[in-house]
Amino acid sequence: MPLPEPNDPDSGSVTFVNRFTLVGSAAEFEAAFAETAEFLCRRRGFRSHSLLAPAADDGATEGPPNYVNIAVWDDEACFRDALAHPEFPAHAKALRALATSEPALYRARQVRVAPRSARTEGSGVRET
């Protein structure tokens, strides 16, 4: 049986969104986050994550540097089990030393994907 699509409203999957505001260096934060992500990606139910930084350093984002992590899990139980793992607190502590965070867990309500033609139109990509 194939896995449901990530964030299909009927799949039971959850998306964890965590906004980090740095109090330490970006390089140190990214290194600590990479270690945490490596740990989490080996937990049951982990599907994917993206660590995002502002698109441009143009002054549009006020205040200290920030990041957003978006992680998709099979279900809430898998996510909670990962956080309850005995090794997780050390990872959380390392991140807390470098950033404050605003975590929240979400379930998809609506999902839309652009048709293939809309994604390639005008992009210089040709379908063969």
Image: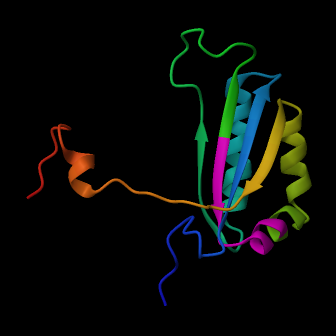
Residue in view at x 66 percent, y 74 percent: 12
Q: Residue furthest bottom?
A: 1
Residue in view at x 80 percent, y 74 percent: 77
Residue in view at x 60 percent, y 8 percent: 59
Q: Residue furthest top?
A: 59
Q: In the drawing, does residue 8 fall left or right of residue 82?
A: left
Q: Residue furthest front?
A: 110
Work out whether 70 lies above or below 12: above
Q: In the drawing, does residue 110 fall left or right of residue 37?
A: left
Please tell me in which quadrant of the rendered image residue 19 appears: top right
Q: Position of residue 80 (x, y in %)?
A: 83, 67
Work out whether 69 lies above or below 85: above
Q: Residue furthest left?
A: 128
Q: Is residue 75 magenta?
A: yes
Q: Position of residue 53 (x, y in %)?
A: 59, 30
Residues drawn in magenta? 69-80
Residue in view at x 67 percent, y 67 percent: 42
Between 105 and 111, the residue placed more toward the observer is 111
Work out whether 47 lies above or below 96: below
Q: Position of residue 120 (x, y in %)?
A: 21, 47
Please tell me in which quadrant of the rendered image residue 108 appears: bottom right
Please tell me in which quadrant of the rendered image residue 8 appears: bottom right
Q: In the drawing, does residue 92 fall left or right of residue 123?
A: right
Q: Is residue 85 magenta?
A: no
Q: Position of residue 101 (x, y in %)?
A: 83, 37
